[in-house]
């Protein structure tokens, strides 16, 4: 096989592999990959004393650790803008009756409040606004104990 054909074959296989590794972006894609939505008891077991790392749509990477009293201090920075100032915010967290993880953060310039469901796919976790709407967006998160 000529070198150019071998190179083209390797490139095609590499691109196919990259497509297979793409992160799910919707509930339907998560479910198709075998993810499960965690119930309220599973969320209550998972999240206390856990560090949460999430990426905002703006590119801000946020870190906080859920304290048992329902509070945390969040820290946000933008890896794409290393000279941008780091932000800190006081926050609270809770798990609502539906099993959704609810967060309020009082940043210096704005307030952030949301409730998201937690999904598990192997050792990875995701937040999603719905457990049942197949088109609902999901975002990968990191949970560290």
Image: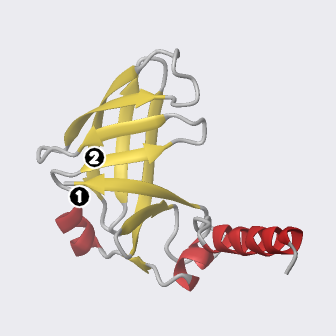
**Of residues 125 and 43, which is closer to you in this image?**
125
Looking at the picture, does residue 91 appear above or below residue 81? below
**Res. 133 visible in picture:** no
Residue 136, image x, y percentages: 61, 66
CA distance separating discs 2 and 1? 10 Å
Residue 39, image x, y percentages: 31, 76
Q: Secondary structure at mark 2?
A: strand
Looking at the picture, does residue 137 appear above or below residue 66? below
Residue 85, image x, y percentages: 46, 15
**Of residues 49 and 103, which is closer to you in this image?**
49
Give the quadrant of residue 58. Answer: top right
**Tag 2: Cα neighbours inside 10 Å, few (<14), some, or many (≥20)?**
many
**Of residues 12 and 119, which is closer to you in this image?**
12
Q: Secondary structure at mark 1?
A: loop
Whether tag 2 and tag 1 are in contact, CB under 8 A, the answer is: yes
The residue positioned 26% from the left and 52% from the top of the image is: 94
Looking at the picture, does residue 14 appear above or below residue 85? below
């Amino acid at each position: 096989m000529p070198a150019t054909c071998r190179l083209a074959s390797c490139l095609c296989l590499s691109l196919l592999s990259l497509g297979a590794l793409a992160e799910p972006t919707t509930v339907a894609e998560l479910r198709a990959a075998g993810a499960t939505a965690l119930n309220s008891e599973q969320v209550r077991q998972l999240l206390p004393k856990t560090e949460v790392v999430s990426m905002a749509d703006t590119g801000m990477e946020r870190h906080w650790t859920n304290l048992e009293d329902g509070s945390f201090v969040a820290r946000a920075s933008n890896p794409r803008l290393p000279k941008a100032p780091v932000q800190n915010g006081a926050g609270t967290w809770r798990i609502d009756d539906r099993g959704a993880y609810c967060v309020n953060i009082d940043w210096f310039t704005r307030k952030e409040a949301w409730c998201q469901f937690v999904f598990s796919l192997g050792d990875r976790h995701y937040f999603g606004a719905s457990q049942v709407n197949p088109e609902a967006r999901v975002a990968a998160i990191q949970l560290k104990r």
